[in-house]
Amino acid sequence: MVKKNDEVILKDIFLRFLRQADGDEWKVIGENVKNLAGNRTFDYLLGADDSRNTLALGITLLSDDEDDFAYGGLREVMEGRLQETIGPRMHELSGGLVIEIPLDPTGSEIRNLKTAALSVLDAAIDLEPGQHSDVETSIGAVRISCIEGDKSLLFASSSGFGWSNPVSDVSAMSGMLLKKLARMNDQLDAIAYRRALLIGRMRGSIDKAAIREALATFEGRFPNIGELYVCYGEDDLERYW
């Protein structure tokens, strides 16, 4: 199923959801509508039959298939920066260090990675074995954990679909969602009575609880996304805010 077909299916599911939830009949009155700046478009402009209310709807797809979690060159470069920055100062740490780089890094400027590595080092020096910390960097949240034993530097990695624990699932999903929400927030900079984002979640191993926790951290941060919904299937659509 191509992406466009997925979007049409999600739009139809959303229209049925609105009819059941609000009792209003909404219909499409515009497609690929330009935002106020004119540099982006959102998917659908909806209108209600019994009023002049409009709803700007953006649709995006989300899965945790391996292709969606591809690091590309940024991961390799970031690991190199961390090795160069932390390796020579491992003796200052209280134990070994495990680093989880976001599955979908949000940055792209290589010159910022040295600063990100220094932020990770500063946080790691304060940790005792058994403690962990989430460090906000230019590529997203980097989770570091101090462990007993040799003072070695390890990088967490995915194996197939999903990660090894719920905390990592939330971190991975947060990285993916941040990038998508920022883009959709720009698209939904439009004049409409309601502005909503619908995320299609048709497959993946990370469960709803992790997605719910990740989304909760973003509520209120994207002013153009007044309503956010996730569709997990034909009869499984949830409103998150």
Image: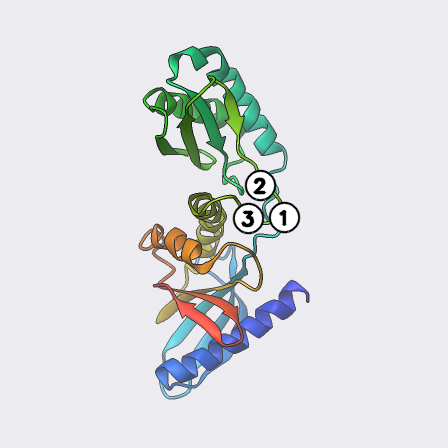
- Left or right position of 72 against 149: right
Three-letter residue code for mark 3:
Gly
The amino acid at mark 2 is: Ser
Q: How many marks?
A: 3
Seen from the viewer's position, the closer of residues 158 and 150 is: 150
Q: Earlier in the sequence, mark 2 or mark 1?
A: 1
Residue in the picture at 37% in, 32% down: 132
In the orientation shown, which residue stands out farthest toward the bottom?
A: 50
Q: CA distance from mark 3 to mark 1?
A: 9 Å
How far is mark 2 from mark 1, CA to CA?
Answer: 9 Å
Q: Residues within 10 Å of mark 1 (few under 14, many from 20)?
A: some
Q: Position of residue 11 (x, y in %)?
A: 53, 73
Residue under pointer 1: 66
Q: Residue, x 52% and y 39% (percent of image)?
A: 105
| Residue at numbered disc 2 | 158
Circle 3 is placed at which residue position? 162
Under tag 3, what secondary structure? loop
Residue 156 x %, y %: 53, 34
For the residues bearing labels 3 and 2, Cβ distance under 8 angstroms = yes
Which residue reaches farthest right?
Answer: 1
Which of 168 and 187 lies nearest the eye of the viewer? Answer: 168
